[in-house]
Each structure stands twice: as C-alpha cells, then as structure tokens.
Image: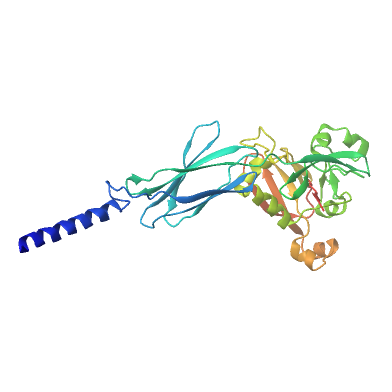
Amino acid sequence: MKKHLVINIIFAILLSSCDGDYNNPFDPNTDFDFSPKNLSAEIISPYVIKLHWKSPTASIDGFKIDKKESTGNWQLDVAANLGNTTTFWIDYNCKPGTEYNYRIRAIAGDNLSDYKSIIKKTPEGNPTGTFIDNRDGKIYKWVKIGDQTWMAENFAYMPYICSPETECGIWVQGYSGNNVDEAKKTTDYLKYGCLYDWYTANTLAPDGWHLPNDEEWSKLINFLGGSLIAGDKLRINGIGDATNESGFSVLPGCYKVLGSFNCVSSLFWSGLPQWAIDRAMTLQEWQNFTSSCDCYYIWNDEELTISDCSLKIGASVRYLKN
C-alpha cells in the first residue's frame, strides 16, 4: 500500500512538472499561446500609423513586426528589438491612401509565437486649391496638411527689388539688378519666387495669412513623422529620396547671405516665437532684442534642420492661413 502511494506521489510531481514546462514560452515543447493580444491600429495622420497590443505574459524576450503594402512583399523585422514590456509601435513611414498589412509575433528564446495580423488604410492625400493675392493678381497654390493650410509654393510678391549686395529686404536668386519688371521675367523668379529678410517677410503676408512661428512649423513636421523623414515628404520628387507626399512641393533653391546666393538648400523663415507673441512684442522690439530668428533648412538631400539665422539674410517664405 505504501509502495503504491509513493509511486502515485512521484507520478503527480512529474505530471505537474511537465505541465509547468508546457506553459513556459521558452520550452521547446510548449503549447502555450504567448502571441500578442488585442492588436489594433490607430491612424495618427496620412503618414503615421500606431499599433497597440497586449502581452499575455512578461516571460518572453520581446516582439518583432513585419509590414507590407497590400500588393507588395513583406518587409521583415521593420521593428525587431521591441522589449517584453512594449505595448505599442509607431510607423512613421506611411503614404496617404495606402493599405498596409502588419503582423506581430512574440519571441521567447528560439521560440516564436503565432502571428497576429491587422490591415489599416491611411486617408487619401491632402486637399489643395488656389487663392489670389489682390495686390498683384498672382495666383498661389495651397495645400491642407492636417488641420493647417499652407502655401504650396514660394511667396513672390515684389513691390521693389534689391541687388544681393544691398540690404533692402527683397531679392530674386541669380538676379543682380534693381528693376522689378526685369526681375519678374527671370526663370528663377518664375520658379522660386522671392527671398526676403525677416522683417519684410513678416510685413508682406496676404490678407488672411501669416508667417508661421516655431510651434506651427513643429506641428507640420510632427504630423509628417518628425524631422528625420519630414524633409523627404516636403520636397518635390526626384531629389534624393523625396516623395512630396505632403504636396508642400519644396524646390532645391537658394538663400541670400553676405552679398551672394548660396544654393545648397531651401531656407524658410519662421515668425515671432510664441512667447514673444504672448508678450505682444512688436517686430521692431524683436529686432532691438536680438539679431536672429529660427529658420528651417530643407536640404536638397538631407533631413530637415532648424538653425538660428541672421535677420538680414534672404530666405524663402511660405505663409500659413489664419
């Protein structure tokens, strides 16, 4: 009788031990489902999708994600080193009006869970249109990106013109004269518009538009996925990896500095910073306070960068609708 009792106890212990192994994601023979749970996808913008999920257990190494467009091949391990406490991942490399397939699995040693999959389609491209500057009758394109409406081409109002050696506020890249009618006939004016110093850029906005400040520029950049990739979405196709998905249509232009034109980047002004606006600071008070302001370099083949620029240089202008 005692012998049978001992055998039954040993058998129960072994059975319990085996059950424990099969519930261990790291066990080669496990039948435990440790795949991610409650997978969902959230549209942040036409360029950004956020995945959410829950882990059934903390006893794993982490997760990895694959991605593909509906008609394309799988891009394996677009996110390959997500920790075991991670519950979301943001895809900043999306295009408007595109259907994406995602699949995620958990990793436990050499074991991989079953996939959990989801399909999400980004919204269509940005609305566009035109408006007229009644001062000279010029028609400008605009594009709505998120909840902001931006000019989709460089500003070109030119009540006067300066040679690059003269500090008077308005220039046309490649033009060295001072005749407005002559400057307006140049190829560079027709393609790139004008360059303005900071004060002039702040004073020439068409009715209903204004020079965007840093917060407004940042909102645009973040909507497009951040400074590392926003530049490609803002530049016209054919420049490096540019796609112009946003419709902002930045051209590879120049800026004016120290009496000449530097043609390695397009450079755009920002207006008074928000703290100065909150204090009702005037343009003249800002010029008395400092000799510089932020400007945005959208390089011909690199990421978008912010710099502190002299108020006297000549940069391109994109106004934002009020």
Residue 167 percent across, percent down from the top left: 85, 50
Looking at the image, which is closer to me, 143 or 194? Answer: 143
Residue 10 percent across, percent down from the top left: 13, 59
Q: Quarter-wise, where is residue 158 in the image?
A: top right
Query: Is residue 306 left or right of 23 when viewed as pictured?
Result: right
Question: Which residue occupies the extreme bottom position in the image?
Answer: 279
Specify the quadrant that holds the N terminus.
bottom left
Q: Residue at x 39, y 56 (%)?
A: 57
Question: Relative to 225, does residue 16 appear above or below in the rendering?
Answer: below
Q: Which residue is drawn at 18% across and 58% down?
A: 12
Question: Relative to 17, does residue 190 appear above or below in the rendering?
Answer: above
Residue 166 visible in the displayed image: no
Looking at the image, which is closer to me, 114 or 198? Answer: 114
Looking at the image, which is closer to me, 152 or 252? Answer: 152
Report the label total.
0
Looking at the image, which is closer to me, 205 or 39? Answer: 39
Residue 43 visible in the displayed image: yes
Query: Is residue 163 left or right of 256 when viewed as pictured?
Result: right
Question: Which residue occupies the extreme front position in the image?
Answer: 1
Query: Is residue 151 left or right of 226 when viewed as pictured?
Result: right
Residue 108 percent across, percent down from the top left: 35, 50
Residue 120 percent across, percent down from the top left: 58, 42
Q: Quarter-wise, where is residue 85 in the image?
A: bottom left
